[in-house]
Image (cartoon, rainbow, N blue to C red):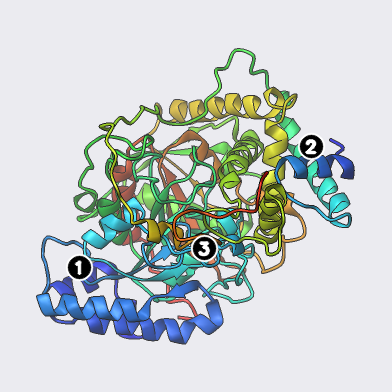
Amino acid sequence: MKISPEKVQGIASLARLEITPEQAPILAAQMGDILGYMDTLNELDTSNVEPMYTPVAHVSVLRPDETSKEFPREDILRNAPENNGEYFVVPRIV
Amino acid sequence: MSQLCQLSLTEIRDLLRDKKISARETTQACLDRIAQTEPAIAALLHIAGENALHQAQSMDQSGPDATKPLWGVPIIIKDALITKGLPTTCGSKILENFIPVYDAHCVTALKEAGAIILGKANMDEFAMGSSTENSAFKVTANPWNPAHVPGGSSGGSAASVASGQCFASIGTDTGGSIRQPASFCGVVGVKPTYGRVSRRGLVAYGSSLDQAGPMTRTVRDAAEVLQVMAGHDAKDSTSINAPVPDYVAACARPEDLKGLRLGMPEEYWGEGLSTEVSAACRAAVDTAVSLGAQIVPVSLPHTKYAIATYYILAMAEASSNLARFDGVRYGRRSAHVQDLATLYTRSRSEGFGDEVKRRIMLGTYVLSAGYYDAYYKKAAQVRRLIRQDFLDALTNCDLICGPACPTTAFAIGANTADPLQMYLTDIFTISLNLSGLPGLSLPVGLGADTGLPVGLQLFGGSMEEARLLRTAATLEAHLPKLPAPPLA
């Protein structure tokens, strides 16, 4: 599996990551090796195998549709990089 | 190691219960031990000494509570589990100043059982690693030889227990991250059945694989801690709603292993296994036979596909789970950013380490349009074949056994330049996470060449932790006890 440095930059952009021009060829080689190793799965015929995404049945957890204040607002905002005492603050969008 | 810190969790708990020692004395002994060992092993990211002493003192004032099975026992929690009021970084700069507002479900259970939280253990960033060299903060050393890794990603938890800093620690296991460091550090590590312990409050890496479990110096201690952690949590949709058996009773009276059919998979006992690990594990199996166990040859034919399957699924899940770290609500935010898209990108790029970025990108790639069927769906199909291997093998035997790792602890730096080589070290642990079944690593001796610990792994059927613990406790009682590590 050959991954180009340009492809690495494209994937990084999708993942919201910045990769420097120096890092791109190194990552391209590593990702190529790893994906090449993963291609060994193609030795197996799985055409009749149902995919297994989890070892347990996920049962929807239902609770009464009631609002509750589990945590004080100030406790939640305390971990925010920037807030105005009431809301999270981010750079202007429009 | 001070005499007190050499005791097992069960022994110290009984002394505390009988008022032969105070919670404060016990906590102080552990803190002294931490002060003595941390410069050499660097197992901890946060030490909650003052809080712990304060809690111990107030517990001493009210007196022992027989209804609390861990009353006054100091324990350490892997930094992947959130702890109210105590920093939780998951080994990452992106969460450097994060202080959770609630406790993980299993941490609440441990506190309610009377445990005292002494601190948070170092780990590979977001549990991505097999050596605890990927922590953003420090590299933990193996208490048996500081030039070697303690394993990962729960290397801090394993090293803290092995060196006597605490009486139990909690680790998390996504692809072997409890069992592999337990093996490398000579402690007991249990990966419960997926869903047996609530995952609420465990910072998600591979959601369909992650499971928290105990790391201790004896099997009975692991049973005591698992007893407290296990159980249904209505707020976790992956939590299994079933009664919790009496794990402590299961291993309280080790007898013989008559009637036990022990499966030995050919794939785990052949090529790639170091001579010293093979010898130590085979000696333990011989002990099992001398105690009445019957050896059954079994096969897990898809073992060689497990690593590729695991990394596709884990990286895909990681790329999705780690999207929440965007610099908006918590965690690191890049300075002087003018627009939102750049804020996301810069914050993530500055906050995540190289291994995390590599896995997020691989996960993004295997989930991207055009590659989803070739990688993610394919891996999910092979996952079913791997689980079926175990189910088929377990129709012919009661438990499966094999080495936890192909070698003893490798040297610090040995695999850091080659991520694929590092991934291959997980060959014997990964299949169990894919299958969702429980497993345990038991110290069975020291390697003849390196003098480092060797762990034998036992696998069982779904929810069969009691049988695993009983068997391990019986073996433990008949195997030579490991000495204390040189740094202990």
Disc 3 secondary structure class: loop
Residue at (45% x, 59% y) in the render = A77
Q: Position of residue A58 (x, y in %)?
A: 40, 28
Q: How many marks?
A: 3
Q: Earlier in the sequence, mark 3 or mark 1?
A: 1
Real-space Cα distance between discs 3 and 2? 33 Å
Residue for badge 1 = B71
Q: Amino acid at mark 3?
A: Thr
Residue at (65% x, 50% y) in the render = A92
Q: Which mark is residue B89?
A: 3
Q: Amino acid at mark 1?
A: Trp
Q: Position of residue B149 (x, y in %)?
A: 60, 67
Real-space Cα distance between discs 1 and 2? 52 Å
Real-space Cα distance between discs 3 and 1? 27 Å
Q: Amino acid at mark 2?
A: Gly
Question: Closer to us: mark 3 or mark 2?
Answer: 3
